[in-house]
Image: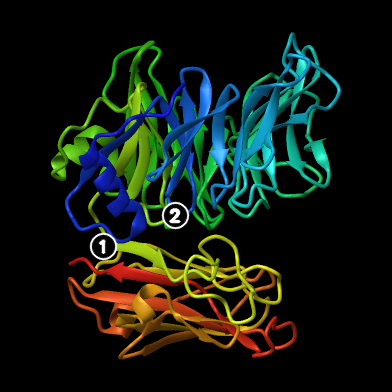
Amino acid sequence: MSPHAYRSQFLALALSLFSGPALFAQASWTPLGSGDATDWSADTSLVCGSDSGSAFLWTASTGQVSLGGDDAVAVSSTGSVVLGNIQDAAGSDVAGLWSASSGWTSLGGVGGSSGNTISTANGMSGDGNVATGLAWINAGTAGAYRWTPTTGMVLLPQAGGGSSRGNAVSEDGSHVGGWEESGSGTRRAAVWDGSPTPSFILTTPTDSVGAGEVWGFSDNNQYVAGYRQGQGFVWDAAGGMTMTGTLPSTDMFRTGSARAVSNDGQVVVGWYRVVFPFDVRATIWTPGTGLQELKNVLIAGGATGVPNLRMAAAITADGSQILAHDGSTWGIADLGTGGTTGSFCAGDGTGTVCPCGNNGGSGAGCANGTGAGATLSRTGTASASASSVVLQATGLVPNQPGLYFQGVNAINGGSGNTFGDGLRCAGGSVVRLQVRISDSSGSSNTTLDIATKGGVSTGDVRRYQLWYRDPATSPCGAGYNLTNGVEITWDA
């Protein structure tokens, strides 16, 4: 596979998508590469996938660049690590990790093989430090595994003696989702969270098996997406399971699955096979509309040039953008709903230098006492009249207060000015939104109506940031720090 050539108008649109808020509110389809795309970085600026039997990594500036290997199934939040499947030095098929510094590295196995295959890769955490898939124990039995740089590949615990597989890892690496066989061989939807045995999330008092598979987690870990009895499902601990339904079909082999879900659980994407074997269609589900073809939803929203999409593989946390492909080309579907969002003013060395050289990770704020920077993001619908926006911060110092605030301006042209241990990014007509205390994992989020508290109107552009305490381990001694900035253009 060679780097893909792009038409200039597509590259210009891609740059607008990934460098800041989009300039349109109607739905759109932007084709960006060839092959099948499988995953993207946290800010959607890097995409991985497979083309002509090789893995690729795409950015707007480099285009689609071949990484070798057999395929790519997941990319880390910063785009620095890619998970895929490769051949090792002995010619065996194994799960592997790619980075720019080391190329492909085999993740190995657990001692067994089936034919020429030792292990396969399926999912990875946002930081690239947890991977999962299937490892062969012997020629007839395989097990779900959890791989980390420290432990290597370790089989996950099982309730029975059959096979299992990991399909997905939560963004923070705390949960692995997939399936484990029951005594009769039926695949049961399973989630591993460090407990001695997996949780079979679809079991009920009237259904002791809970048949199905887990295929994805929302970025905030609240929702699970997957497959059950020929259709997709979305599940959460409070509400249980909701089936996403079917597309019209009389084919006896019709089937489908959910692959990804937004942070509010209101948008679920995946695929549905209408006619065996090749009539497969990318799908989108909401509680109000039920299951629909993604292509039809885009066209109804004003998008043009939409191909016969076959798979919707990933979704942004706010549910507004979807990574999809038609089997030969891939691109970004923008639903044109809920306003637009962009991240700016990172303390990662790309803009204003952090106060004492304490650069954070890519896209995050300046480093705090944890050794990394804190990241601010937005989920929900940015509607001035019916907002469900939640501002979320991760990578904070645990159990410390922080102030979420809103400003009109992006300070210093969006690069920010030094302030405490971090960068002040948002300013002008500042509105104090809410004080929240981070939890033991260093995360917090807003719980009030941001639009009402901030007094926003349709078309307003507002900047947001979290100013938080770091009293004991402050790198520069100021005792406080800030996240990156988030810019929201509010819709009607």
- Report the front residue among 60 and 23: 60
**Residue 27 at x, y percent in the picture:** 20, 47
> Could you give the CA–CA distance between mark 1 and mark 2, rounded to whole angstroms?
16 Å
Judge from the rendering whether residue 422 lies leftward or rightward of residue 3; answer left or right. right
Earlier sequence position, callout 1 versus callout 2: 2
- Residue at which label 1 appears: 339
Q: Quadrant of residue 96?
A: top right
- Residue at which label 2 appears: 43
Circle on res. 33 = none
Judge from the rendering whether residue 314 lies leftward or rightward of residue 236; answer left or right. left
101, above or below 356, in the image: above
Q: Nearer the viewer, mark 1 or mark 2?
A: 2
Q: Secondary structure at mark 2?
A: loop
- Report the front residue among 214 and 16: 16
The type of residue carrying mark 1 is Gly
Q: Residue at x 63, y 25 (%)?
A: 85
Q: Secondary structure at mark 1?
A: loop
- Report the front residue among 453 and 358: 358
61, above or below 488, in the image: above
**Residue 125 at x, y percent in the picture:** 62, 47
Judge from the rendering whether residue 298 lies leftward or rightward of residue 70; answer left or right. left
**Residue 245 at x, y percent in the picture:** 36, 34
Residue at the limit of the structure toward the right, as seen here: 111
210, above or below 360, in the image: above
Whether residue 189 is visible to the viewer of this picture, yes or no, is no
The type of residue carrying mark 2 is Asp
